Image (cartoon, rainbow, N blue to C red):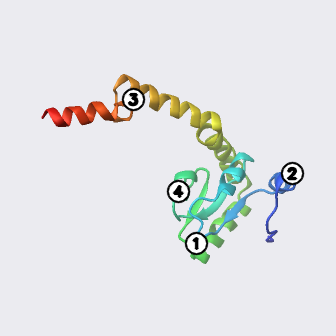
C-alpha cells in the first residue's frame, strides 16, 4: 500500500483500474467526491463515518465504515478485503451499481423530475406556491 498524493484525469482513472479497493480514512472531509469516483470504477471503499459519507457508502454492502481514528478497525477491514477476493468483487459490483443508480447526473435528474411531479400534483409541500400558503394563513 502506498500514498500517491493528488492525481487527476486519465492518470486517476488508471490508478483506479489497477487497484482492488479504495481507502479514505478521513476525519474531516465530510463528503469526498473521490468516494463516488472509486465506486464508479467498481471499487469497494473503506472509509469513516464522518459527515454524509454513510449516505454514500453502505456498510457491508459497498464497503466498510469505521469510526474516525480507529486504526485497528481500519486495519481489520483492509485485511479482510485483502484476504477475501470474492468479497472485494461483490462489494465492487454493488458499489458500481449504487453509483449508477444513485449518483449519476441521470439518477439526480430522475429524482428531481419525480419530486417536481409530486409537487405539481400536490402530493407534498414541495410544489405548493408560497403565495397560496401565505394567503391561507391570512384568511384564518
Q: Quick one: label 3 or label 2, which is nearer the N terminus?
A: 2
Spatial CA span between label 4 and label 2: 28 Å
Residue 10: which numbered mark, if any? 2
Q: Nearer the viewer, mark 1 or mark 3?
A: 3
Q: Quick one: label 3 or label 4, which is nearer the N terminus?
A: 4
Image quadrant where residue 48 sits: bottom right
Is disc 1 placed on a helix, strand or loop?
Answer: loop
Q: Quick one: label 1 or label 3, which is nearer the N terminus?
A: 1
Front residue of 89/67: it is 67
| Residue that numbered label 4 is attached to | 54
Asked if residue 13 is positioned above or below residue 2 in the image, the reply reads above
Spatial CA span between label 1 and label 3: 38 Å
Cβ–Cβ under 8 Å for marks 3 and 4: no
Image quadrant where residue 4 sits: bottom right
| Residue that numbered label 1 is attached to | 27
Spatial CA span between label 3 and label 4: 28 Å
Asked if residue 138 is positioned above or below residue 42 in the image, the reply reads above
Amino acid at each position: 500500500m502506498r500514498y500517491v498524493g493528488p492525481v487527476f484525469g486519465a492518470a486517476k482513472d488508471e490508478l483506479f483500474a489497477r487497484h482492488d479497493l479504495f481507502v479514505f480514512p478521513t476525519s474531516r472531509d465530510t463528503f469526498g467526491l473521490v468516494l463516488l469516483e472509486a465506486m464508479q470504477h467498481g471499487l469497494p471503499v473503506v472509509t469513516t463515518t464522518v459527515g454524509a459519507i454513510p449516505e454514500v457508502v453502505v456498510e457491508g454492502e459497498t464497503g466498510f465504515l469505521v469510526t474516525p481514528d480507529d486504526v485497528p478497525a481500519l486495519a481489520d477491514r483492509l485485511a479482510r478485503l485483502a484476504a477475501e477476493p470474492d468479497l472485494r468483487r461483490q462489494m465492487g459490483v454493488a458499489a458500481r451499481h449504487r453509483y449508477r443508480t444513485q449518483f449519476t447526473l441521470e439518477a439526480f435528474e430522475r429524482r428531481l423530475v419525480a419530486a417536481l411531479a409530486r409537487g405539481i400534483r400536490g402530493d407534498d409541500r414541495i410544489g405548493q406556491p408560497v403565495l397560496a400558503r401565505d394567503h391561507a394563513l391570512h384568511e384564518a
